[in-house]
């Protein structure tokens, strides 16, 4: 699938933060179908049982893709939201040290709320975990006082990637 453009990364977010030594540092891409996708790897620091990523970090990635799906659909990183609920379904163990693909799409959106669907797949397109996430749209000032989103999300690291290829399961 073709990439339209790349989204910014933050400083300290556990999923996309470039300055977080324990973070995943995942890149996120706006796709031609209006979804968001990421190519990433968890690291051994993210494990629960040996060989498996902690379920909370799996859910954190689904949550990250949910908000970013709104940005992909709107073509802008201006709207923010806070998670109201997240229903995660773990289908298979999520490994660390292996290439993974994440995808998020908008299911519904209005002026106050939005609902997304997100999943983490292996490179063969097998869904390892997925979730439905509900958010309330909220100004960044309401979320974190004097937060300047542009100051918190300063990194736009172009990598030249033009598409994300994976096999359908």
Image (cartoon, grey):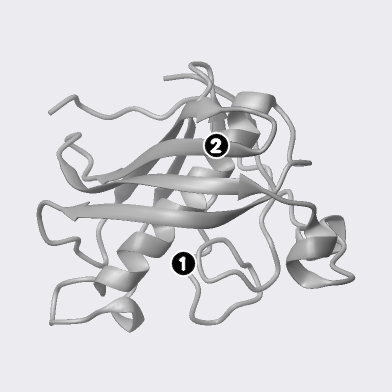
Q: Is residue 167 left or right of 6 when viewed as pictured?
A: left
> Is residue 42 in view from this perspective?
no
Q: Does residue 54 appear in this view?
A: yes
Horizontal side of residue 21 vs 101, given as left or right = right
Q: CA distance from mark 2 to mark 1?
A: 25 Å
Residue drawn where x is 87% and y is 62% of the image:
148
Residue 62, x across and y down, in percent = 39, 52
Report helix, strand or loop for mark 1: loop
Is residue 95 shown left or right of residue 138? left
- N-terminal of the two: label 2 or label 1? 1
* Lateral position of residue 103 relative to residue 23, left or right: left
Q: Is residue 55 above or below residue 1?
A: below
Q: Hey, which quadrant is residue 82 in on the image? A: bottom right
Kindly identify which numbered label has been placed on residue 24: 1
What is the x, y in percent for residue 49? 13, 82
Quarter in which the N terminus is drawn: top left
Using a 10 Å C-alpha cutoff, classify the residue at mark 2 as few (fewer than 14 neighbours), some (14 to 19) or many (20 or more).
many
- Relative to the observer, which residue lies in front, 57 or 11? 57
Residue in view at x 52 percent, y 71 percent? 14
Per the image, label 2 sits on a secondary structure element best described as strand
Q: Position of residue 65 (x, y in %)?
A: 48, 47
**Residue 114 badge:** 2
User: Which quarter of the image is occupied by the C terminus?
Assistant: top left
- Mark 1: few/some/many CA within 10 Å (<14, 14-19, 20+): many
- Which one is nearer the viewer's eye here, 71 or 42? 71
């Amino acid at each position: 699938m073709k990439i339209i453009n790349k989204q910014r990364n933050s400083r300290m977010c556990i999923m996309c933060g470039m300055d977080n030594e324990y973070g995943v540092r995942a890149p996120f891409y706006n796709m031609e179908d209006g979804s968001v996708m990421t190519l990433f790897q968890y690291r051994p620091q993210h494990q629960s049982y040996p060989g498996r990523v902690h379920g909370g970090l799996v859910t954190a990635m689904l949550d990250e893709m949910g908000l970013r799906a709104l940005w992909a659909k709107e073509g802008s990183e201006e709207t923010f939201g806070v998670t109201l609920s997240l229903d995660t379904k773990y289908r298979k163990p999520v490994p660390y040290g292996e290439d993974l693909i994440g995808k998020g799409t908008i299911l519904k959106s209005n002026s106050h709320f939005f609902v997304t669907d997100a999943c983490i797949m292996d490179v063969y397109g097998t869904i390892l975990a997925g979730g439905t996430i509900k958010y309330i749209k909220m100004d960044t000032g309401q979320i974190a006082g004097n937060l300047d989103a542009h100051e918190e999300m300063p990194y736009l690291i172009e990598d030249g990637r033009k598409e994300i290829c994976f096999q359908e399961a």
